[in-house]
Amino acid sequence: MARAHNFCAGPAALPEPVLARAQAELLDWRGLGCSVMEVSHRSAEFMAVIEAAEASLRRLLSISDDYAVLFLQGGASQQFSAVPLNLASATDTADYVVSGQWSKKALSEGGRLLQAKAVASSEAASFSYVPAQTTWQLSDNARYCHYCPNETIGGLAFPWIPSVPVPLVADMSSVLLAGPLDVNQFDVIYAGAQKNIGPAGLTLVIVRRSLLSQLRADCPASLSWQLAAENQSMANTPPTFAIYLAGLVFEWLEGLGGLSAIETLNQRKATKLYALIDSSDFYSNPIEPSDRSIMNIPFTLADPALDNRFLAEAEQQNLLNLKGHRSVGGMRASIYNAVPESSVDALCAFMTTFEQRYG
């Protein structure tokens, strides 16, 4: 059976070559007679896996030794708590830019642990644009500034990197590895794996080493970046299979030609889909064109009564997971790295014929 065209926002599609290799190695990994999930995380064999994965990620993003690379358990939402616990005290102030549901959740969790301040927000306009930095009301004494470069739910992305006088923290769960990135412009980057990195259950943290000593005394050991860095991400048993798969994804990306090559492909996919939407009176996208995501593309139909029919007929064509987030409605196509261009072509063809029938 042919694989489906999978537009899931996460857990998202994984590269077929990665899945095929994992399948081939599942029962007998490296001639050991067992899977990678069944060996000690402290064995020489698995240590080679995590070391190779880190080295590959460092090559892809040109990460210097000024930064620690951590492979942690849990999702990115866990880092909503870890960020303030590792960078500030309960009486400190931290700035948050609110451009969508995920940065709003980060602000809410930050507010439980310190003095979190929303310095800019586009919520009044349904998160349809990125707040210009000239409008931000930055604090004089903030310990860090947090933002989300790509909001998966609303399909909004920052077309620029903020410049702030304090450590810059970015939730890059849905955009990390989608293209080249100057890591040196950030102090903390964190990302849940289930978009462009690997399976759910793994979170990457890239943190400037000079910040590791700032954690507060009541930071739980399980959330301490310093402890994780001192123990090579093995203060406790790490998510070994997820790390193994992430390493295969990094290897796959390097084989494609790195992040410049995947960015070219991602831009081409997004351009095709946005062009179809913009040329139609039947489909529409609510985001300011300059602030549109190339990873997550929401769209609505002129007649919402057709939504369920659209989804049902799409599924008949093996076009899966196109329903928009419950807080937004409509449709959403998430076209991460592992979604092939042929899947976007199939979606565009379906959308064209659907409009011809019902428009």
Image (tube, grey):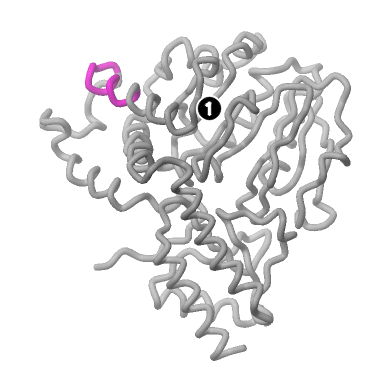
Give coordinates of residue 280: x percent, y percent: 65, 79
Check the image and report above or below for 269 versus 352: above
Q: Residue at x 66, y 56 (%)?
A: 292
Q: Is residue 199 left or right of residue 1?
A: right
In the current view of this chain or complex, which residue is farthest to the bottom?
A: 357
Q: Which residue is more in the foreground, 96 or 61?
A: 61
Q: Residue at x 41, y 15 (%)?
A: 232
Q: Is residue 101 left or right of residue 39?
A: right
Tell me which corner region of the image, top left, top right, bottom left or bottom right, holds residue 140: top right
Give coordinates of residue 31: x percent, y percent: 10, 30
Amino acid at the residue labelled 1? Val
Q: Which residue is mark 1?
A: 205
Q: Which residue is more in the foreground, 180 or 242?
A: 180
Element type at marker 1? strand
Give coordinates of residue 124: x percent, y percent: 85, 54
Magenta segment main secondary structure = helix
Q: Which residue is more in the foreground, 336 or 313?
A: 336
Category of crowding for the residue at label 1, using alpha-carbon neighbours closer than 10 angstroms: few (below 14), some (14–19), many (at least 20): many
User: In which quadrant is the C terminus drawn?
Assistant: bottom right
Tell me which corner region of the image, top left, top right, bottom left or bottom right, holds residue 328: bottom right
Count of marks, rendered view: 1
Q: Which residue is more in the foreground, 355 or 316?
A: 355
Check the image and report above or below for 343 versus 279: above
Give coordinates of residue 143: x percent, y percent: 76, 20
Q: Is residue 47 magenta?
A: yes
The boundaries of the magenta stretch are 42-50
Q: Residue at x 40, y 42 (%)?
A: 199
User: In which quadrant is the N terminus drawn?
Assistant: bottom left
Q: Is residue 268 magenta?
A: no
Q: Residue at x 76, y 18 (%)?
A: 90
